[in-house]
Amino acid sequence: MSEEKCPKCSGTKLVEGTDYTHVRPLGKPMSMGSNKIYTYCVNCGEIVSIRIEYPHKIG
């Protein structure tokens, strides 16, 4: 597997984090939803990817 690099600065130290807001299905504001997981570059802060932790919870 090749090492992932930041598209902005070519940094190789990428880490994952989340925020406090969940993604919820449209029209279902009371749904528990799921976390967004961000992969970002420690060097410049560029967000490389965003994914849903448990997509089946919002499908």
Image (tube, rainbow, N blue to C red):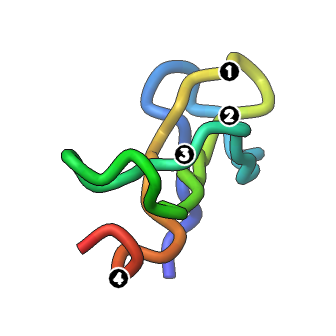
Q: Residue at x 54, y 51 (%)?
A: 36
Q: CA distance from mark 2 to mark 3?
A: 8 Å
Q: Amino acid at mark 2?
A: Cys
Q: Amino acid at mark 3?
A: Lys
First-in-chain label (4 vs 2): 2
**Label 3 crowding class (10 Å Cα cut-off): few <14, some 14-19, many 20+?**
some
Q: Name the residue carrying label 3.
A: 5
Q: CA distance from mark 4 to mark 2?
A: 28 Å
Position above or below: 57 against 15:
below
First-in-chain label (4 vs 1): 1
- Residue 58 got which mark? none
Q: Amino acid at mark 4?
A: His
- Is the Cβ of the residue at disc 4 closer than 8 Å to that at disc 2? no
Q: Residue at x 35, y 82 (%)?
A: 56
First-in-chain label (4 vs 3): 3
Q: Name the residue carrying label 4.
A: 56
